Image: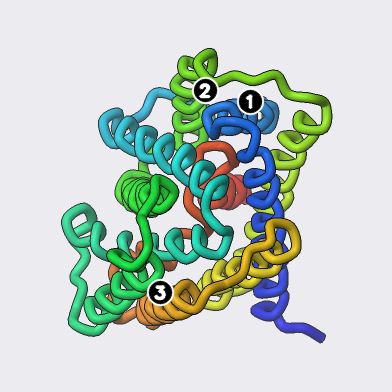
Amino acid sequence: MLGANAKGALLALAGFAIFATHDVIVKVLGAHYSPIQIVFFSVLLGFPLVLLMLIRDSSGGSLRARHPWWSAFRTVAVIITGFSAFYAFSVLPLAQTYAILFATPLLITILSIPLLGETVRLRRWLAVIAGLIGVMVVLRPGQSELGTGHLAALAAAVGSAFASIIVRKIGHEERSLVLLLYPMIGNVVVMGAALPLVYRPMPIEHLGGLALIAGFAVLATLCIIGAYKKGEAVVVAPMQYSQILWATLFGYLFFDETLDLPTAVGAAIIIASGLYILFREGSGSVSENRPVLRTRSRPETGTTLRIGALMRRGQSRD
């Protein structure tokens, strides 16, 4: 009989495997279309679920943000993250993209100091520095050409970290639907305005790919929500790093990609640093806010529903 933590870990592994499959489809479509078009239609396909949540929401209250400036900054960060992540998946090897995105917890730790008043002591600083060295190993400046894909992956990591920290700062006061809706609306407005410049007609199979992206995102989100309800966060959160294994496998099977030594070494350093920070926060004695441990999923792109917001809504009805 599996214990609660084991069930949570297995559900999380399933969720992140589905997310990795989601990213394969993003990469396939990215070979034909601008990330602007992919993000725009992905958001549109996610809106019916948000509308369903609005209909079922009985908490009342306005959808006006209580912290409009922080909400605006977060919306901009999410829009940048979504566009950058989808572009990076389109042009970089999957494993390399994940390795760079895994730097997000390191950046969250740094940003938590000015924005949350977090105290980061020597051990976590050493983990952050080691992780950033791992990023440099992956990027190999001076040995390989840094392209727009690398810059996009870095921008996605920074944007995701900034968005996550803002949620930690204002999330206890903002309605969950505000946190869900604003980035999605922002994506529709910004990507919709740019869409005429890049739009290409899509055959039925590619429209089906967009539907799969939306469907996989929902299914993966439900799995991860279930994982956090079953298991402890310190057990469930590290499962996100399993995506590098799926990226390596899918990259080899579908895109003739191989995991080179610098990417493997850099990813290992970044993952080890992230795990150390997670476990230190999980000890309960080194962090008041636990900003990394409470970031429950991948970089937020504004194309899918937020796991944390959905969990808070579920708890408020219990």
Mark 3 lies on a secondary structure that is: helix
Kindly tell me whether residue 147 is visible in this rendering.
Answer: yes
Spatial CA distance of label 2 from label 3 is 33 Å
Q: Is residue 53 above or below residue 300?
A: above
Q: Position of residue 107 (x, y in %)?
A: 31, 61
Residue at position x 44%, y 48% in the image: 149
The colour scheme used to paint the residues is: rainbow
Amino acid type for the residue under numbered disc 3: Ile
Q: Residue under circle 2?
A: 188
Amino acid type for the residue under numbered disc 2: Val
Image marks 1 and 2: residues in contact by CB distance under 8 Å: yes
Residue at position x 82%, y 32% in the image: 205
- Quadrant location, the N terminus: bottom right
Image marks 2 and 3: residues in contact by CB distance under 8 Å: no
Spatial CA distance of label 3 from label 1 is 34 Å
Q: Which mark is residue 44?
A: 1
Q: Position of residue 292 (x, y in %)?
A: 39, 65
Q: Residue under circle 3?
A: 270
Q: Nearer the viewer, mark 3 or mark 1?
A: 3
Q: Position of residue 266 (x, y in %)?
A: 42, 75
Residue at position x 28%, y 65% in the image: 142
Disc 3 residue crowd, few under 14, some 14–19, many 20+, Cα 10 Å? many
Amino acid type for the residue under numbered disc 1: Leu
Q: Is residue 106 above or below residue 167?
A: below
Q: Is residue 168 above or below residue 53?
A: below
Mark 2 lies on a secondary structure that is: helix
